[in-house]
Image: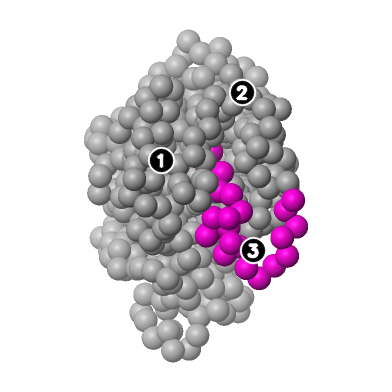
């Protein structure tokens, strides 16, 4: 049985999927630190509060683990996402969660051995820390070894958008370890450099890395750091991050689409009725909302039988509003950044460390794709047959909205270009779906001819 391809970096243990059970093998050499940390009351309290993933004995699991390894089990999360798929607010929440966790644990005598963003996952928009082997007994006088990693994977990506208005997503996806501090320092204009926090966490470390004074820094940290100073650093960093806000997300193209669109009130109600009826009939444990915008129809699905919704959109302004909706209304809805014409690939070591979107689609029991097809088929020149192949492969059943050429939104896409889309028509679209699945129904919901098509390939 092979270990999960994302768990190979830590010699202290491996993670296995055993018939749906998530089992971690803790190496014999790491058992003492593991047991000391997990018996600590501070960590137990954080587990009870949902800040840290639960861990129970799994000695009965059939895992081909190294001799002497201790087996423990974690609850299976509904979906694994990556920092490059998170909006600014999700990344900020993950950063604050990590710091809150460190502060609480340090006061209780436990420290974290690293600060990778990949150790945080989300259930809805609620963060949870998932690496049971990152905890170790605190040693009086030690420094925060994870500071550089925290800055590159949490702080620097946040500062890119907070200071420069540049989203972190594409950069982080292309550089899986985050945004290097010297690189960020070169991008910050002189007018924005007058900040103690920026000097302490970006500019001074960048200078140290670039000028070869790292050895001096290593000698400096040989002096003990009092726990009070360690906590002060964490609290100061937390207070700064809590004030950060993204630039530019209030002016994105589709941020206000849910409020300003071409639907009449009765047409919008018809669309909502179809989504509600579909979700009640299917009752999916997990539904994917492609082009989720601000999450209105995700909320409709959750109100009518879907247990959780994973949303995807490429408009960061809309995703910020979707995050706010999920947070304020306590929805089991996780809105993620995703460009459907360039979705998350399989990447990392061996091309398998971080899974592609398609490789994670086995968790989707249903999908909805509303006001979405024309953006890919016409806006991005993806042939209609290839779009249908991709869509139907993601989930066994779904609802997809087809927007015809005479619709105002499609006319906007065609306004400054030649119409080369001869096969873009509803009947062609349904025929293409029919190659892979059964078309259950097709209902026209607007005067322009928008139709909601329900398909099932089960």
Q: Where is residue 364 in the image (x, y as percent from the top left)?
A: 51, 30
Residue 305 falls left or right of residue 355:
left
Q: Which of 71 and 446 is in front in this view?
A: 446
| Residue indicated by mark 1 | 271
Q: How far apart are the alpha carbons under marks 2 and 3? A: 31 Å
Q: Position of residue 433 (x, y in %)?
A: 65, 32
Q: Which of 243 and 185 is in front in this view?
A: 243
Q: How far apart are the alpha carbons under marks 2 and 1? A: 21 Å
Q: Identify the image quadrant of residue 393.
A: top right
Q: Where is residue 166 in the image (x, y as percent from the top left)?
A: 51, 70
Asked if labels 3 and 1 touch by Cβ distance under 8 angstroms, the answer is: no
Q: How far apart are the alpha carbons under marks 1 and 3? A: 25 Å
- What residue sits 49% from the left and 39% below the top? 444
Q: Is residue 48 visible?
A: yes
Label 1 or label 3, whichever comes before in sequence order = 1
- What residue sits 31% from the left and 53% below the top? 324
Q: Identify the image quadrant of residue 333.
A: top left
Q: What element carries label 2?
A: strand
Q: Identify the image quadrant of residue 410.
A: bottom right
Residue 389 falls left or right of residue 110:
right
232 shown above or below 304: below
Residue 441 falls left or right of residue 106:
right
| Residue indicated by mark 2 | 438
Asked if labels 3 and 2 touch by Cβ distance under 8 angstroms, the answer is: no
Give the extent of the magenta segment. 400-422
Mark 2 crowd level (few <14, some 14–19, many ≥20, 10 Å Cα): some
Quadrant of the frame with the C terminus: top right
Label 2 or label 3, whichever comes before in sequence order = 3
Label 2 or label 1, whichever comes before in sequence order = 1
279 shown above or below 125: above
Q: Position of residue 228 (x, y in %)?
A: 25, 60
């Amino acid at each position: 049985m092979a270990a999960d391809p994302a768990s190979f970096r830590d010699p202290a243990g491996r993670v296995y999927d055993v018939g749906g059970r998530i089992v971690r093998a803790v190496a014999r050499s790491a058992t003492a630190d593991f047991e000391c940390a997990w018996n600590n009351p501070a960590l137990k309290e954080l587990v009870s509060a949902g800040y840290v993933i639960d861990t129970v004995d799994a000695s009965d699991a059939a895992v081909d683990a190294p001799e002497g390894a201790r087996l423990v089990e974690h609850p299976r999360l509904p979906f694994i996402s990556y920092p490059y798929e998170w909006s600014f607010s999700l990344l900020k929440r993950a950063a604050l969660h990590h710091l809150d966790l460190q502060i609480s644990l340090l006061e209780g005598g436990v420290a974290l051995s690293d600060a990778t963003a990949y150790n945080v996952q989300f259930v809805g928009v609620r963060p949870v820390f998932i690496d049971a082997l990152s905890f170790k007994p605190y040693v009086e006088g030690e420094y925060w070894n994870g500071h550089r990693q925290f800055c590159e994977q949490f702080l620097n990506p946040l500062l890119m958008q907070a200071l420069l208005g540049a989203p972190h997503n594409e950069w982080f996806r292309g550089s899986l370890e985050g945004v290097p501090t010297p690189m960020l320092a070169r991008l910050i204009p002189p007018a924005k450099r007058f900040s103690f926090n920026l000097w302490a966490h970006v500019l001074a470390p960048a200078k140290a890395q670039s000028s070869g004074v790292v050895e001096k820094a290593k000698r400096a940290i040989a002096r003990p750091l009092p726990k009070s100073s360690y906590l002060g650093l964490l609290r100061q960093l937390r207070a700064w991050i809590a004030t950060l806000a993204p630039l530019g997300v209030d002016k994105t193209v589709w941020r206000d689409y849910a409020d300003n669109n071409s639907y009449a009130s009765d047409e919008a109600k018809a669309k909502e009725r179809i989504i509600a009826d579909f979700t009640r009939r299917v009752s999916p444990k997990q539904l994917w909302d492609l082009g989720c915008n601000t999450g209105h129809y995700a909320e409709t699905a959750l109100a009518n039988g879907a247990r959780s919704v994973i949303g995807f959109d490429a408009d960061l302004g809309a995703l910020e509003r979707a995050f706010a909706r999920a947070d304020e209304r306590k929805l089991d809805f996780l809105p993620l950044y995703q460009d459907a014409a360039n979705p998350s690939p399989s990447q990392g070591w061996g091309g398998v460390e971080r899974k592609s979107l398609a490789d994670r689609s086995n968790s989707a029991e249903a999908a909805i794709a509303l006001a979405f097809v024309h953006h890919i088929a016409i806006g991005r020149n993806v042939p209609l047959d290839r779009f249908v192949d991709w869509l139907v492969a993601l989930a066994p059943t779904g609802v997809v909205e087809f927007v015809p050429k005479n619709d105002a939104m499609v006319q906007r896409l065609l306004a400054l270009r030649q119409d080369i889309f001869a096969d873009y028509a509803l009947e062609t679209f349904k025929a293409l779906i029919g190659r892979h699945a059964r078309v259950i129904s097709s209902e026209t919901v607007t005067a322009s001819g928008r139709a909601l098509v329900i398909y099932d390939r089960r």
